[in-house]
Image: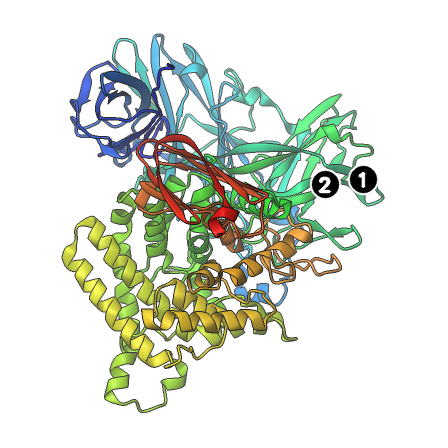
Amino acid sequence: MAKRSCHTLRVEHLERPLMLDPISPRFSWMVEHPQDSYRLTVRDGNGTLAWDSGIVDSGQTTLIEYRGVPLEHDADYLWTVHSFSGTAEHTAESHFATAPDLSAWEAEWIEPAQEPTHREQHSFMDWIMGGAETSPADQRLRPAQLVRQELHIRPSLARARLFATAHGVYTAWINGQPVSDEVLAPGFDSYRHRLSVQGYDVLGMLRSGTNTLGFAVADGWWAGRIGLTGTSAQFGDRLALTWQLHLGFADGSTQVITSDSSAFSSTGPWNYSDLFIGESYDARRADESWMLPGFERPEWTPVRLLGVDASALVPFRGEPVRRVAQLPVASIDHRADGVLLDFGQVIAGRLRLKLRGQQRGQRITIEHTETLDAQGEWFQNIAGMNKEQTDHYICAGEAEEEWEPEFTFHGFRYVRVNGIGQLDPQDATAVVLSSDLEQAGGFRTSDERLNRLHQNVVWSQRANFLSIPTDCPQRERAGWSGDIQVFAGAAANNAGVYTFLSRWLENLRADQLPDGRIPILSPRSEHDAQSALESPGLGAIVAAAGWSDAVAILPWKLYERYGDPRVLEENYSAVRRWIEYQAAEAERGLPRGLEDLKLGPERLARQRLIYNSGPHFGDWLTPSTLEGDEPLHEAMDLAPKLTSEIVAPMFQIHTLDLAARMAEVLGHSAHAAQYSQRAGEVRSAFLAEYLGEDATLPVALQGMYALALGLDILPESKRLRAGEHLAALVRARGQRLDTGFLSTPFLLDALWDTGHQDLAREVLWQQQAPSWLYAVDHGATTIWEAWDAVDPSGQPRQVSMNHYAFGCVDDWLYRKVAGLTPMAPGWREARIEPDLSCGLDHAEAWIQSPFGRLAVNWKLEHGHLSVTTVVPFGLNAVLKLPGQQATLAPGTSVHHLDLFATAQ
């Protein structure tokens, strides 16, 4: 028999992390055998034992907390797991390293010689009304800066770690070799409160004697154009860097080399580089000798020293942005207006181009877009200022040149290249950028449209999980809290998102306002705050129901999928403050229709419990509210006006319910009772105010019923009747959905759970807009922002073709169509119950649970059902099929059922 082992060793959900918080890390592994007991040992870089758990009689393989001597900062550790099964012992080992003590940061911030970023400030209304005049990019952007420092390294180097961060985005080299394959470091953070420091193992790049540490730094999120309005310099207008090189030698001695006055700076080949506008690179000025020892040029100037400031520094947590894939050209068309490249897939990334025989000084222009018009002509589907998505390359005149932008990315499928004659399709590659998250699931069926829908979700997630969870990779790239909370379940199925989303939640908590408000987006800049003060209507919203509630919804969803209570602990205080803000607003505010009425004491007391006043987005983008001839800004305001008064208290109740559950998990029993009681009081008040005796709600939209059912607002006695109202509204729309941003995730489940399974299936399979398959049938390769982003004739609208939010249906595909449903936190228990009446002959799905791969593959053929399941050790699973239920043993099992016989 083959030896079975333990594998996939992780510390804090990461394999071999380099920047681990040394306080109480947790260890996890996966086994291919029934574990009876385990033993964990941790040794430092000298081999000294830091912890020995002893033999622990337990089958637990996840999140086992370190209990040894305090771990050192900036240290390497080897950890070993011994997993015992009967008399057999299975052993595996891995490494981790801890972050330096950033409170003791020694390095000065250094500032290259530069002009400040040209400030361009635009408002929400500028965007709504179609933008503002802007000057050419060459006149409003500055070049990326180069910085170099020569270092002397003495012999017998045994360990070397570079720690660095920037105001801007940077790439670092040692002796001409990149220190990492990550891009756009340090990533996007709420820089006023936190700035991530990266750690790199650079031992193999350094040599005895003189070495050169080089950096290129550009505006990035710090000073470049970002957000809905494309306003520049939202966090700062000058670039700066700080770094420390930590060295260890064979004799045990150590040395720290820091950024200081020995560094020099200059401009390089970049004329400018901006995340939104694009990059201009002059290869004639490229000279990589600046990265090497012995380089001297009189035009390089000393850097300016800014002093030491570690107040916002934090260790980078999670996975960095990398080049995660490359796509070849799907088709090429040499046209009069340029060479048109189609990569067959909408992505976030950039173009890598090989050029041959170009004249020195030849200017190559590279434009990007997500779609063409109905006639196949160039069409820019993005709206707003400062979003050209255009790169420029000025040729060096070499026989062969290759270039890929360094400090920008674009949302695109199509690229138009000008300034070149013929282009071989093999010389163009689309480089896909994303935070480098592990694939954690897969889904496939006998229907290619459903498969394409799933792939569209995966591609939209990949494009928008780039440093932070964004709404779109071409227009805003903003961390809208509503987008991620509605998509979190689908996200966790498809990728390992725990650390990625936990890091974003750190930003969200940092951005929480003193009065408890959770902002609608994070990271949030001073410009965002000022814009809200100055904007009318929707632009003035700072916190909103369903968006701000992400502070409770997202941690709970992560707890459900990963079983890690630490995410609840980290966010619990912020949830409590948000709840108190809601309560205070409920106490002092009334909805617009009641402000001038004299309410009786009983009704007034109810109203004082309900958070139903103030501006909110409501059930944003409800399709039927956008069908008139009103201008865009008026149409967008209709759903908020109709639904906010009802939506806000429903999410208030939901957050109170979640707070009670969080408190229970964390052992705060008094809080749990308090929040449970308050949830009951607010729910009773809401029902008395808004629910009719016949289970009707005052706004006859599908979303209101979907939320009332999905958020468990209604009493059991009213649920089926409310489901009838929902079903009637769906049928009245021709079996098409009419749900908005917040309610779409709940629609199919609300129908299903109230006895309308066939109608839920009809909505899923609907081909007319609004529907998921309409987009698929009209060529979508990602999830659209609007259900009708392309009209039936093939003409696109000026909306994003890459918004993941409506891809929340992917969670339904896993749970209902394939049948994989978590029944306990962290997938410790699961139910496999496929929908055999969904119209498919075959479906398969898999999930990488904390215990290993959980999978199902079912096939229907002439009334005969075969189901193959894979269950990892440590996970308890049941298989539910018509007329039978079976507890599944770990491993692979095959089940057969004659459905004709079952029916009889």
Quadrant into which the N terminus falls: top left
Marker count (numbered): 2
The colour scheme of the drawn protein is rainbow
User: Hey, which residue is sitting farthest right in the picture?
Assistant: 336
Taking depth in this image into account, of 763 and 632 the one nearest to the observer is 763
Q: In the image, which disc is placed on residue 199?
A: none
In this image, 46 relative to 400: left or right? Answer: left
Query: Image check: 883 left or right of 79?
Result: right
Mark linked to residue 333: 1
Q: What is the x, y in percent for residue 277?
A: 61, 47
Identified by mark 2, the residue type is Asp
Label 2 close to label 1 by CB (< 8 Å): yes
- Residue 268 or residue 698, whichever sits in front: 698
Where residue 132 appears, as percent x and y from the top left, is 63, 62
How crowded is the residue under tag 2: few (<14 C-alpha within 10 Å), some, or many (20+)?
many
- Disc 2 is placed on an element classified as strand
Mark 2–mark 1 Cα distance, whole angstroms, equals: 9 Å
User: Which residue is denoted by mark 2 in the rendering?
Assistant: 342
Identified at 27% across, 84% down, the residue is 604
**Residue farthest bottom in this picture:** 598
Type of amino acid at the residue the image marks with label 1: Asp
Q: Residue at x 38, y 69 (%)?
A: 719
The quarter holding residue 122 reads bottom right
Rendered position, 849 above or below 264: below
Q: Position of residue 427 (x, y in %)?
A: 72, 28
Whether residue 139 is situated above or below residue 541 in the rendered picture? above
Closer to the camera in the image, 602 or 732? 732
Return the x and y of residue 601 as percentages of the image width and height.
24, 87
Q: Earlier in the sequence, mark 2 or mark 1?
A: 1
